[in-house]
């Protein structure tokens, strides 16, 4: 009887895991579709109200000031990794410098006022400042490297030229809302399948990776790249990742692996990667994922110095 009971227990556990995975998939998909729709609608209206030329002029600059402006926009837009995509598309369609758009893409999910405030309160203001400097310098450096490697031509032309047709001067919110809704739904339709695939794979991985895997990382040097690699497929909000990550300190996990996981999981995710596959060609998509991994590993080694 005992073997059969153990088999039934394993079966119940497996069923429960799959039910929880399906629930996670459904809730996450609904959340991301809602976020993407609202933010895309807002970005389309902002693009129309400000105008492409004005946005392009605001973000223009030399090799340092252009990506620095991209980071500045990233700081004041508290987006998760997936929610950066609509704003990124708006920048590219407006003809903003590639370095500004690239720096925004990297920095936006990683540094915003809420995340910085949490770091200052939960750790220290010195650590918060060090974290901000590391992410800012990394974002600018990577944007410049991408530009030097000629990765600007890895943006799909359909995205750059696929924006709404210039309809002349701003006609008021009531008149502009309908074409903005049409443009939003068109963009959502284009990226809906990649988004659903990414969420599905991410949900399966989320259910398959037990918390004991992260708790068993310890504080060894090898744990930093491992933590960064484990977290990339997951969808993690920075505001949730920081408390969760710091709670692992009690389980013996070091600050290095914890912040490698936070940076990697917050800066990239499978849903975001699949959405970006509709915007970026393979070389640029691979460069993005590798760059987030590199920032996470560097942060894992550098940030513990300031604790």
Image (cartoon, rainbow, N blue to C red):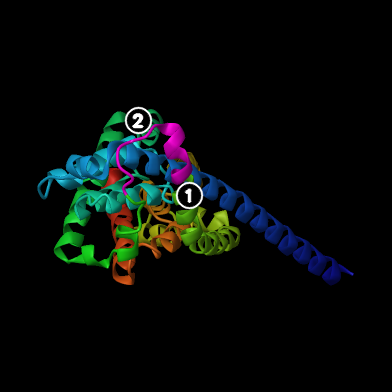
Q: Are marks 2 and 1 in contact (CB under 8 Å)?
A: no
Work out whether 196 lies above or below 104.
below
Answer few, some or many: residues within 10 Å of disc 1's Cα (few below 14, many 20 plus, some between 14 and 19): few
The quadrant the N terminus occupies is: bottom right
Quadrant location of residue 224? Answer: bottom left
Q: Is residue 261 left or right of residue 63?
A: right
**What x and y, as percent, mark residue 36?**
48, 48
* Nearer the camera: disc 2 or disc 1: 1
Q: Is residue 5 magenta?
A: no
Q: Is residue 44 left or right of residue 50?
A: right
Q: Secondary structure at mark 2?
A: helix
The quadrant the C terminus occupies is: top left
| Residue placed most toward the observer, 60 or 246 | 60
Q: Residue at x 17, y 60 (%)?
A: 147
Q: Which mark is residue 120?
A: 2
Give the mark nearest the N terminus, 2 or 1. 2
Q: Which residue is mark 1?
A: 182
Is residue 126 in view from this perspective? yes
**What x and y, as percent, mark residue 180?**
44, 44
Q: Secondary structure at mark 1?
A: helix
**What x and y, as percent, mark residue 12?**
78, 61
**What x and y, as percent, mark residue 153?**
23, 66
Which span of residues is magenta-colored?
166-180
Answer few, some or many: residues within 10 Å of disc 2's Cα (few below 14, many 20 plus, some between 14 and 19): some
Q: Residue at x 29, y 53 (%)?
A: 93
């Amino acid at each position: 009887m005992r073997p059969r009971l153990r088999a039934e227990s394993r079966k119940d556990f497996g069923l429960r895991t799959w039910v929880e995975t399906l629930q996670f998939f459904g809730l996450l998909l609904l959340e991301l579709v809602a976020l993407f729709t609202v933010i895309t609608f807002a970005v389309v209206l902002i693009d129309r109200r400000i105008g492409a030329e004005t946005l392009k002029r605001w973000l223009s600059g030399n090799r340092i000031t252009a990506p620095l402006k991209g980071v500045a926009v990233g700081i004041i837009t508290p987006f998760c990794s997936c929610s950066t995509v609509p704003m990124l598309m708006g920048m590219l369609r407006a003809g903003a410098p590639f370095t500004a758009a690239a720096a925004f893409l990297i920095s936006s999910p990683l540094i915003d006022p809420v995340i910085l405030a949490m770091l200052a309160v939960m750790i220290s203001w010195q650590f918060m400042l060090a974290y901000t400097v590391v992410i800012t310098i990394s974002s600018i450096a990577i944007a410049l490297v991408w530009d030097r490697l000629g990765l600007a031509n890895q943006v799909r032309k359909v995205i750059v030229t696929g924006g709404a047709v210039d309809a002349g001067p701003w006609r008021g919110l009531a008149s502009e809302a309908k074409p903005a809704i049409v443009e939003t739904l068109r963009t959502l339709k284009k990226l809906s399948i990649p988004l659903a695939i990414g969420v599905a794979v991410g949900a399966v991985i989320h259910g398959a990776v037990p918390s004991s895997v992260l708790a068993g990382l310890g504080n060894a040097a090898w744990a930093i790249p491992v933590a960064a690699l484990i977290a990339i497929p997951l969808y993690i909000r920075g505001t949730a990742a920081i408390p969760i990550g710091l709670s692992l300190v009690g389980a013996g996990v070091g600050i290095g692996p914890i912040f490698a996981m936070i940076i990697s999981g917050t800066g990239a995710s499978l849903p975001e990667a699949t959405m970006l596959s509709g915007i970026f060609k393979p070389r640029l998509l691979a460069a993005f994922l590798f760059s987030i991994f590199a920032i996470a590993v560097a942060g894992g080694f550098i940030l513990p110095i300031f604790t």
